[in-house]
Amino acid sequence: MGEGPAQTDGRARHVAIIMDGNGRWAKKRALPRAVGHQRGVEAVRRLVRGLEPMGLDCITLYAFSSENWKRSEDEVDDLMNLMRKFIKSDLPDFVANDVKLKIIGDWRGLAPDIVAMLEDALEQTSKGTKTLAVALNYGGQDEIVRAAAKAAEIGEVTAQSIAANLDTHDLPPLDLLIRTSGEIRLSNFLLWQAAYAEMLFVDTLWPDFKPEHLAEALDDFAKRERRYGGR
Ligand code: FPP
C-alpha cells in the first residue's frame, strides 16, 4: 500500500481510526481509566460488526502505540489484558463473519502469550474477506525506518519500494483517517499512508463512537473532492 493515492469511485474502502478519549470518558463519570478502555473495546466490537453493511474492505485501529509503554504499569497491564480477552472472546465472531485479522507494528515484542494468541488468530482468520487491522506496539516513523532499511537491502530506495515493505503493504490505500476526542494530531500513526488520505477530527470520545458516526463520516467522505495534488 502507499504507491500512490487511493483510486476510488467516491466510496471509502479503507478507514483508520485513532481511538482517543477513553480516559476522559471515564474521568467525566468518576470511573477508573480501565473502565474507559473496557468501554473502548465495546466500541471496537460494535464497529467490527458494522463493517459489512458499510461496504468497507478494511478498518485499521490504533490500539497500542510504541509510546504507550510510558503509561503506568497498571494501565499497560489493563490494556494488554483487554487485548487478551478481546481476542479470546471475539475470534469466533471474526471467523464466522469473514473478518481477517491483521496486526501492524512491532507486535512480536509483546508478551509471548499474546504473540502466540495473535499468531493463532491470524491463522484462523486468514481466509476472511474484510480486514480488521490492529496497530500494536506501532509507531509510524519506526514502520518507515524498517521499510526503508528493507528497501536499501535490495538496493532500491524509492517511494514504491518503501511502500512495498510497509506493514500495510497488502492493505488497500488509506482513504480516511479519523481521530476522536477533539485532538488534532497524528501521534505517529500511519504517517506514510496518510500522505493522500482525507482526515476527520471529531469531538466524540471513543467509547461513545457508534457505527452511525462512521456511516456519517463515510457519507461526508463520499462528497469530498480528492485531487491528489492535481487541479
Ligand atoms: C486512547 O485513550 C486510547 C488508547 C491509548 C488505547 C485504545 C485501546 C482501546 C480502545 C482498547 C483496546 C483495543 C482493542 C482493539 C482490544 P486515552 O487513554 O489516551 O484517553 P484520554 O486521552 O482521554 O486519557
Image (cartoon, rainbow, N blue to C red):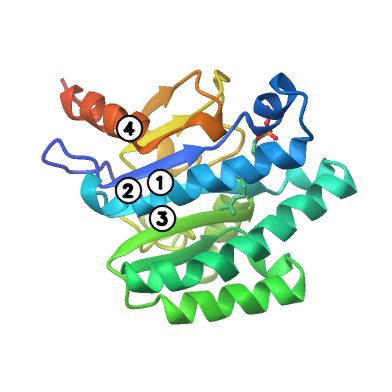
Q: Position of residue 153 (x, y in %)?
A: 54, 70
Q: Residue at x 40, y 52 (%)?
A: 48
Secondary structure type for disc 1: helix
Q: Residues within 10 Å of mark 4 (few under 14, many from 20)?
A: few
**Mark drawn on residue 140:** none
Amino acid at circle 3: Ala
Q: Position of residue 223 (x, y in %)?
A: 17, 23
Q: Residues within 10 Å of mark 3 (few under 14, many from 20)?
A: many
Secondary structure type for disc 4: helix
Q: Is mark 2 within 8 Å of ligand 1?
A: no
Of the four image quadrants, the one with ligand 1 is top right
Amino acid at circle 1: Leu
The residues bearing labels 1 and 3 have C-alpha atoms spaced at a distance of: 28 Å
**Mark drawn on residue 47:** 1
Q: Residue at x 38, y 74 (%)?
A: 95
**Mark drawn on residue 212:** 4
Q: Which residue is mark 2?
A: 50
Q: Which residue is mark 3?
A: 163
The residues bearing labels 4 and 2 have C-alpha atoms spaced at a distance of: 9 Å
Report the side of 220 relative to 24 (left or right). Answer: left
Q: Quadrant of the N terminus?
A: bottom left
State which tag comes first along the sequence, 3 or 2: 2
Secondary structure type for disc 3: helix
Decide: is 16 above or below 87.
above
